[in-house]
Amino acid sequence: MKMNMYALMIQMFEGLGMTLSIFVITLIAAIPLGIAVALMRLSKIKPLSKAIELYIWIMRGTPLLLQLIFVFFGLPYIGIIMDRYPAAMMAFILNYGAYFGEIFRGGIEAIDKGQYEAAESLGLSPKRTFFRIILPQVIKRILPAVGNEVITLIKDTSLVYVVGLGELLRVGKIASNREASLIPLMAVGIFYLILTAILTKSFEAAEKKLSYYQ
């Protein structure tokens, strides 16, 4: 029994590693993608803006699970074949890029136009204006919404079971079936609670640190 418990914990931490890997890489890629999506969505170039609007509509209008299935099982029909992990990452990044894009767009549109005019009067370039003046204020405004999406992301990682990746929940389900016990699933629940608690506290601390923009 001790050996089984030891083996189970090893498997759990391996599953946790996969979960955190998907989570971190999605964040690293999807947040910059979200900023780019927001800027393209706000572009005065109509074809570009409409194309991004369509992308956002598709990503937000269909379940992430369906997108995972389409990328891994559907794209091979048109000659695009990917391994499980890259397929999962592509689906996650495109999905969360769309959600973050809309969050950033809302934050950018909420900034008073006078901020841009003041920056222009000081001789700042549009790029410096955006990254030095606008973006810090946007981040402060959207932090709660981003926090909610990030916490959702850590739980959504469990969906990669559909392409056969051994993330935390899949490991727990297999162990639960093998041992005919709910203990592995309870352990999975504890892992997720710890992760969401850490993320919640981190975003609360970030909100306090950025409160000087108020």
Image: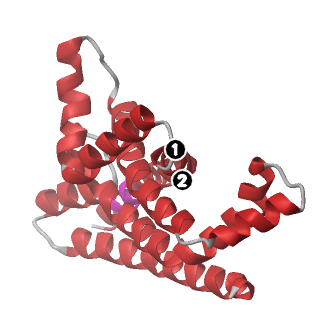
Is 102 located above or below residue 181 in the figure?
above
Q: Residues within 10 Å of mark 1 (few under 14, many from 20)?
A: some
Label 1, on which residue? 43
Task: Give the x, y percent position of residue 133.
Answer: 76, 65
Q: Amino acid at mark 1?
A: Ser
Residue name at image x 38 percent, y 79 percent? 193
Q: Is residue 210 left or right of residue 15?
A: right
Secondary structure of the residue carrying numbered label 1 = loop
Residue name at image x 14 percent, y 70 percent? 181
Give whichever of 112, 77 is nearer the camera: 112
Residue 135 lies in what quarter of the image? bottom right
Q: Is residue 50 left or right of residue 162?
A: right
Q: Quadrant of the C terminus?
A: bottom right
Residue 209 lies in what quarter of the image? bottom right
Judged by its main secondary structure, the magenta piece is helix
Q: Mark 2 or mark 1: which comes first in sequence?
A: 2
Residue most extreme to the top: 79
Q: Is residue 160 visible?
A: no
Q: Residues within 10 Å of mark 2 (few under 14, many from 20)?
A: many
Is 56 located above or below residue 117 in the figure?
above
Task: Give the x, y percent position of residue 108.
Answer: 56, 64
Q: Quadrant of the N terminus?
A: bottom left
3D distance between C-alphas at marks 2 and 1: 18 Å
Residue name at image x 61 percent, y 69 percent? 138
Q: Is residue 165 left or right of residue 116?
A: left
Task: Give the x, y percent position of residue 76.
Answer: 22, 17
Give whichever of 130, 124 is nearer the camera: 124
Residue name at image x 39 percent, y 72 percent? 191
Label 2, on which residue? 31
Q: Which residues are magenta?
A: 7-12
